[in-house]
Amino acid sequence: MPDPADLAVVTGAARGIGAAVATGLAAQGWSLLLVDACAAQPGIGYEMPAPADLDVLASRCAEAGARSVEVHRADVGSADFVASLTHALQRRPAAAAVAAAGVIAGGPGWGTSEDAWASLMNVNLHGTRRLAEATIPGMVRAGRGRFVAIASAAALRAMPQLAAYSAAKAATVGYVRALAGDLAGTGVSANAICPGSTRGVMLAASAEVYDLTGEEEFASQHLIRRLIEPREIAEAVVWLCGPAASALTGAVLPVDGGLTA
């Protein structure tokens, strides 16, 4: 169990993998700061979660066992995110930070809109970087902490029609590995998880990119022959945030049902 003072910050918390991570950490007794923009993103064609979704999750986390739960509506893709989150932390060091905010858009490498490119890079890559900028200094001062980024199997293998998304996620993997190098000897770790096809709104949007009848058609790409559930990714994140992962840093873990095997 975490120390009663341990705080975990989770971005992209209102739904999907972020919500599953928040619930999983709550069940372990973490205190939580749940972050989500709950607002439309330029160039992204599917609906974003609503503020009520973040509030519902906060209640669910409290019921699951979180010591305390706060919500913070802020966009990781915005230049003022670091200042906003720093203010919300009120000088408290985060013991864990999970960059789960993400968006997806399809199109060939030569035919993706400027708006989509901007959102994919701002949310997926710079959102991860901004979370680190807001939380890592406090972790280093405390001499301990866990930083975990949700990347994608698209960072590890070719996926047609997802060049911009793949570029953002591959850059995220590179950033986290270099971050681990910068953190050498500080007591703070940095790791990335690369999920395969995980059930949710983003996978449904991907199905539309490929003109599929639904997200279940992606199951055949996995060796396990089924989709991955958000809670399965969350279990890996919770493990990385706990004592059992104390020797792991700079790792890129493909939790992908064998997609990249």
Image: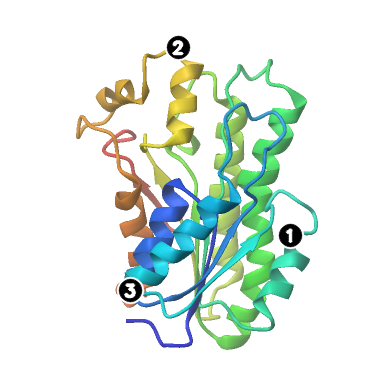
For residue 21, say whether it is visible.
yes
Nearest to N terminus: mark 3 or mark 2: 3
Q: Say whether residue 39 is left or right of residue 151.
A: right
Q: Which mark is residue 96?
A: none
Q: Residue 25, image x and y in percent?
A: 38, 68
Judging from the image, what secondary structure is the residue with disc 1 in? helix
Q: Residue 202, image x and y in percent?
A: 48, 34
Figure label count: 3
Task: Sort mark 3 into few (<14), some (14-19) or many (20+) by Cα contacts within 10 Å.
Answer: some
CB atoms at circles 3 and 1 under 8 Å apart?
Answer: no
Q: Residue 238, image x and y in percent?
A: 36, 65
Give the Cα distance between marks 2 and 1: 35 Å
Q: Which mark is residue 81?
A: 1
Q: Which of 201 and 248 is in front in this view?
A: 201
Give the Cα distance between marks 3 and 2: 40 Å
Q: In this view, does 241 lie above or below 174?
A: below
Where on the picture, by quarter, is residue 26?
bottom left
The residue pinned by badge 2 equals 211
Q: Which amino acid does label 2 sit on?
A: Asp
Q: In this view, does 155 lie above or below 7?
A: above
Q: What residue type is labelled 3?
A: Gln
Q: Residue 120, image x and y in percent?
A: 65, 37
Q: Say whether residue 240 is left or right of residue 88.
A: left
Nearest to N terminus: mark 2 or mark 1: 1
Q: Say whether residue 198 is left or right of residue 43.
A: left
**Residue at (72, 22) in percent of width and height:** 113
Nearest to N terminus: mark 3 or mark 1: 3
The residue pinned by badge 3 equals 28
